[in-house]
Amino acid sequence: MLQSFDEHAQKGNEFLQLIAFELGDTSNKEAAERITRAVFRSLRELLTLEENFQLIAQLPLILKGLYVEGWAPQKKNKKRSKKLDDFYLEVIKEEGAKARKDFSTEEEIKKGVNAVFTVLRMYISEGQMKDAKAVVPDEIKILFSANSIEIH
């Protein structure tokens, strides 16, 4: 049992290490975890309940827990960001007090969100990413594409 737990922890750590790499600071897994949590919380409000569960099914076990932490799924989302900038603001809000440290500029929020989606595309099948992309507002679809968001 312990070996199985260690394997799950290792997969979660690999995911966070990839995000830290995308952020340009492999020594800061804490920031990678905070940003991932905030993006997951914001993402689950964008997706339908069905798409959330299909996406979660493909995540490593520990990340499934991170995705659903504090979530009370409902048939209908409370609010949906319609614009990409609104999604960024929602991520900042979800991160809370540490957001000022992780996202001191607009470039940093874009880089953080892009890092999480870049790594998600490594773990989630192309078909599932297309399915999730189909249910989000048009301006937010770029996050689900292999094209990275241009950061100025």
Image: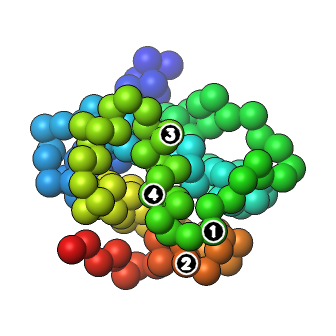
The residues tagged by marks 4 and 3 sit, at their Cα atoms, a distance apart of: 10 Å
Q: Can see residue 150?
A: yes
According to the picture, the residue beneath numbered tag 4 turns out to be 88
Describe the element under mark 1 as helix, strand or loop.
loop
Q: Whole-percent x and y of residue 10? A: 34, 35
**Mark found first going from the N terminus, 2 or 3:** 3
Labelled disc at residue 82: 1
The residues tagged by marks 4 and 1 sit, at their Cα atoms, a distance apart of: 11 Å
**By what rule are the colours in the image chosen?**
rainbow
The residues tagged by marks 2 and 4 sit, at their Cα atoms, a distance apart of: 12 Å
| Residue at x 75%, y 59% (from the top left corner) | 48
Q: Amino acid at mark 1?
A: Lys
Q: Amino acid at mark 4?
A: Tyr
> 149 left or right of 49?
left
Q: Residues within 10 Å of mark 2 (few under 14, many from 20)?
A: few
Q: Which quadrant of the figure contains the C terminus?
A: bottom left
Q: Whole-percent x and y of residue 43? A: 58, 54
Labelled disc at residue 139: 2
**Mark found first going from the N terminus, 4 or 1:** 1
Dividing the picture into quadrants, the one containing residue 123 is bottom left
Residues marked 4 and 1 touching at CB (< 8 Å) = no
Describe the element under mark 4 as helix, strand or loop.
helix
The residues tagged by marks 1 and 3 sit, at their Cα atoms, a distance apart of: 17 Å
Residues marked 2 and 1 touching at CB (< 8 Å) = yes
Q: Whole-percent x and y of residue 69? A: 59, 31
Describe the element under mark 2 as helix, strand or loop.
helix
